[in-house]
Image (spheres, grey):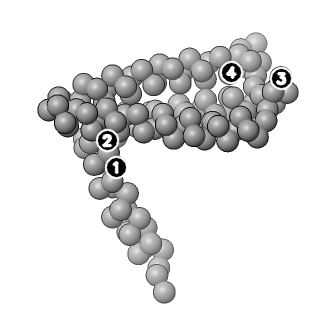
Amino acid sequence: MMTGKTIFGVIGAVVVPAFKYMYGAGDAVVSAMVALTFFIVMDWISGIRAAKQDYSYSSKYGIDGIFRTLFMLLLPAGGHLLDSMFGLPGILFGALTAGLLYHVIQSMVANSLRAGWGQ
């Protein structure tokens, strides 16, 4: 019988090396991905509230959003892999992450206004 400590140890042993391979190592990389994930979650929250406010919510749109979110989280990984391939110091990773952050924050603000939170 596996204990909770063992289960989390196994998960960590798999997730941490996979994260480092896909996104790279370092505090800046972790901070960038945490920030991107945070704002994606905030965008989802504001988007759900906005959709319920103007009655545009549908399960198909929600399912498409899951794939869109997965795609957005994988784009910086692609940037890191290209940086590694071309020997660049994280330029493509940084550019893709910054561009995604800009887009997600714009979407979050627009959703918040649609939800009526700007009043």
Residue 27 visible:
no
Q: Dot 2: few (<14), some (14–19), or many (≥20) neighbours within 10 Å?
A: many
Residue sitting at 44 percent across and 33 percent down?
35
The Cα–Cα distance between marks 4 and 2, rounded to whole angstroms, is 30 Å
View extreme (top): residue: 119
Q: Secondary structure at mark 1?
A: helix
Pick out the residue farthest to the right.
55
Q: Which residue is mark 1?
A: 19
Residue 42: give x, y in percent of width and height. Answer: 60, 32
- Residue named by callout 2: 23
Q: Which tag, 3 or 2, sits closer to the chain's start?
A: 2
- Viewer-side residue, 113 vs 103: 103
Residue with the mark numbered 4: 112
Identify the secondary structure beneath mark 2.
Answer: helix
Q: Amino acid at mark 2?
A: Tyr
Residue 24 coordinates in the image, percent (x, y): 26, 42
Depth check: 57 or 38 in front? 57
Q: Which residue is mark 3?
A: 54
Q: Secondary structure at mark 3?
A: loop
Q: Is the C terminus in the top left, top right, bottom left or bottom right quadrant?
A: top right
Q: Residues within 10 Å of mark 4 (few under 14, many from 20)?
A: many
What type is the residue that disc 3 sits on? Answer: Asp
The residue at the point 48 percent across, 74 percent down is: 4
